[in-house]
Image (cartoon, rainbow, N blue to C red):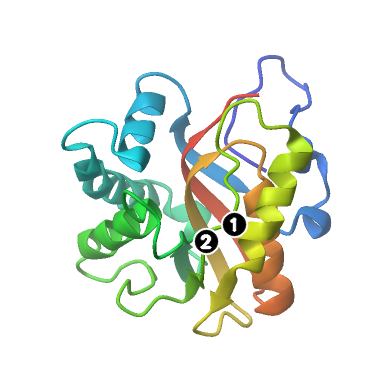
Amino acid sequence: MCSQTLAVPGAKCGNIICGWSAGTRFFTRVDALALYATPLEQTIKEYKYDLKAGSQGWGVIFGRLIVGWLEANEHLVDDIELIIGNPTAPDRTPLQHIETMMKAAHTEDALGRWPIADPESPVLIKQHETKKSATGGVRWAEKMEAAREHASALRLRQSVKGKRVLLVDDVFTTGSQFHTVSRFLIERGHAREVRGLVLARVPW
């Protein structure tokens, strides 16, 4: 269900959610541009939290990388009908990092080859900030609770009914947010299917 290569042929991934059935986890697969490791790990952190002067410029680069991945992997996404980011709160500081890179991706796709949602007319929004779970040492149950809170703060501004949706995020760790957001899109929005694409995946 993902592009990660396991260390031993036939081995099972240690990720709990990835072991669930598609109907239980609510997303069918998640692909990553790279593994979450140095130097990309540090670059993503600098971008998200503005830890270094000029780091917000990575949003443009990440957006272009997303479009490059789509073009290189057309066979995996040629039936996708809508591409949206996993939204952040409007008051998130130092920036709405997902929205920034999705805006860059939309701009990069100048010919409109991919169904990337117009950033000026978002399909899915987050209405307010919720508990964070990205910090180290957070237990799985706490991550899942934070992911549920995140999903409860979402609102659809446009219909996704019957659509195959590609949900874009920065990092896939446990998959808790992919689970809760995909569930929201399918149960509340009646999406036909949800797949995922991230900049980086934490190796298992």
Let me know if residue 28 appears in the view: no
Who is closer to the viewer here, 64 or 7? 64
Q: Is residue 194 above or below residue 101?
A: below
Q: State which quadrant residue 43 falls in.
A: top left
Q: Is residue 105 left or right of residue 25?
A: left
Outermost residue toward the left? Answer: 54
Q: Secondary structure at mark 2?
A: strand
On screen, residue 120 versus residue 178, left or right, reads left
Q: Is residue 123 left or right of residue 6?
A: left
Residue 77 spot, x, y in % from top left: 49, 58
Determine whether 59 is above or below 36 in the image: below
User: Marks 2 and 1, how far apart in space?
Assistant: 5 Å
Q: Which mark is residue 166?
A: 2
Please report whichever mark, 2 or 1, sits nearer to the chain's N-terminal start: 2
**Residue shown at 21%/69% (left/top)?**
111
Q: Secondary structure at mark 1?
A: strand
Please report the residue visible at 64 percent of the width from the left and 63 percent of the height from the top: 151
Q: Mark 1 is on which residue type?
A: Arg
- Could you tell me which residue is drawn at 36 percent across and 60 percent down? 99
Q: Residues within 10 Å of mark 1 (few under 14, many from 20)?
A: many
**Amino acid type, callout 2:** Leu
Question: Which sits in the foreground, 54 or 24?
Answer: 54
Please say if 80 is above or below 140: below
User: According to the image, label 1 marks what residue?
Assistant: 195
Q: Position of residue 33 (x, y in %)?
A: 43, 38
2 and 1 marks in contact (CB < 8 Å): yes
Say above or below: 41 vs 200. Answer: above
| Quarter holding residue 185 | bottom right
